[in-house]
């Protein structure tokens, strides 16, 4: 039986860049470095009203899906 779980991340830096890029390899606006720069510059933050809430879906211990997200 396959067990699924999830985890929310408040910073893109908590997710391995190579792993992230393996899911988003050809889209500039979901590029790990781009999202990290937005967070580091304060463009997306709790103070700006766009709190990062990135989602990882796991099947047992393996990441099977990633989703960038922001809580408004």
Image (spheres, rainbow, N blue to C red):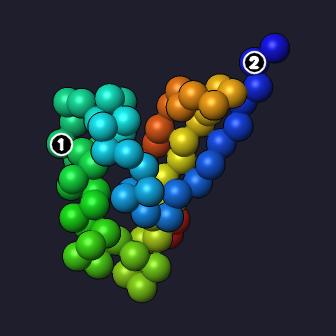
* Residue 52 picture location, percent across and down: 45, 64
Report which residue position mark 2 lands on.
2
- Where is the N terminus found, in terms of image quarters? top right
Residue at 32% across, 29% down: 22
Q: Secondary structure at mark 2?
A: loop
Q: Which image quarter: residue 47? A: bottom left
Residue at 21% across, 55% down: 34
Q: Which image quarter: residue 8? A: bottom right
**Which residue in the rendered view is the most extreme toward the bottom?**
47
Residue at 28% across, 57% down: 35
Q: Is residue 32 above or below residue 20?
A: below
Q: Is residue 32 above or below residue 71?
A: above
* Residue 55 picture location, percent across and down: 54, 47
* Residue 53 picture location, percent across and down: 51, 59
Task: For residue 17, say whether it is visible.
Answer: yes
Q: Nearer the viewer, residue 17 or 41?
A: 17
Report which residue position mark 1 lands on.
28
Q: Which image quarter: residue 58? A: top right
Q: Is residue 13 above or below residue 45?
A: above
Q: Secondary structure at mark 1?
A: helix
Comparing labels 2 and 1, the label whose residue is closer to the camera: 2
Q: Is residue 35 above or below residue 58?
A: below
């Amino acid at each position: 039986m396959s067990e699924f779980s999830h985890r929310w991340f408040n910073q893109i830096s908590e997710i391995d860049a190579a792993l992230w890029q393996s899911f988003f390899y050809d889209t500039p606006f979901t590029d790990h470095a781009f999202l990290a720069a937005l967070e580091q510059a304060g463009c997306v933050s709790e103070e700006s009203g766009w709190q990062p809430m990135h989602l990882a879906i796991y099947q047992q211990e393996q990441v099977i899906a990633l989703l960038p997200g922001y809580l408004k």
